[in-house]
Image: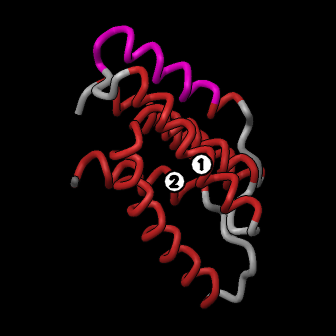
Amino acid sequence: MSPASIVPGALLLAASAFDVKTREIPDAFPILLVLWAGLSRALGYQIPAWWGMALGLLVGLAVGLFLFRIGALGGGDAKLLAGLGACLGPAAFGIAFAWICLVGGVFALVARFRRRREVVYGPALAIGYILAVTIT
């Protein structure tokens, strides 16, 4: 695992801790993800080129905004997806998003069995990302 993947994982874990505790994700986390994407690219850690970073950001933002619009995610989760897209680029974001959806689906099933209506999705983002960078 390179520093390019460790830092986003740590940021996502910290954001998920805030999400669990407060049901909000501070704007600093997606901003730090985008800043890290640029810095890691400048330092040569990041695999996607600059255009891949920008396209990943746009793909993550589009997916996040769509899911926010239909009520599937909160605003902080949507912004985290944009930051994650910048860190990964569009292709790797697609793989990570598949893992995030799988983990989020398991969380939603558990919430349903526990008769809870709301699912905190920050941990699903962090766990899905970690699975994506370690398994695939």
Q: Is residue 98 above or below residue 25?
A: below
Residue 135 percent coordinates (x, y): 22, 54
Decide: few, some or many residues near mark 2? Use Cα within 10 Å; few <14, some 14-19, many ≥20.
many
- Badge 1 is on which residue? 16
Residue 86 percent coordinates (x, y): 49, 33
Q: Which mark is residue 125?
A: 2
Query: Mark 2 and mark 1 in contact (Cβ < 8 Å)?
Result: yes
Residue at image point 51% right, 43% down: 13
Q: Choose mark 1 or mark 2, whichever is in front.
A: 2
| Prevailing SS of the magenta stretch | helix
Residue 84 percent coordinates (x, y): 50, 40
The kind of residue on which mark 1 rests is: Ser
* C-alpha span from label 1 to label 2: 8 Å
Element type at mark 2? helix
Residue 133 sits inside the magenta stretch:
no
Q: Is residue 124 above or below residue 126?
A: below
Q: Quadrant of the N terminus?
A: top left
Total number of numbered discs in the rendering: 2
Is 105 left or right of 41, judged from the image as shown?
right
Residue at image point 71% right, 43% down: 25
Residue at image point 55% right, 19% down: 35
Residue 44 sits inside the magenta stretch:
yes
In-front residue for pair 83/25 = 83
The kind of residue on which mark 2 rests is: Leu
Q: Picture quarter containing residue 119? A: bottom right
Residue 123 percent coordinates (x, y): 54, 56
Residue at image point 63% right, 80% down: 111
Q: Which mark is residue 98?
A: none
Element type at mark 1? helix
Q: Earlier in the sequence, mark 1 or mark 2?
A: 1
Q: Bounds of the magenta span?
A: 31-45
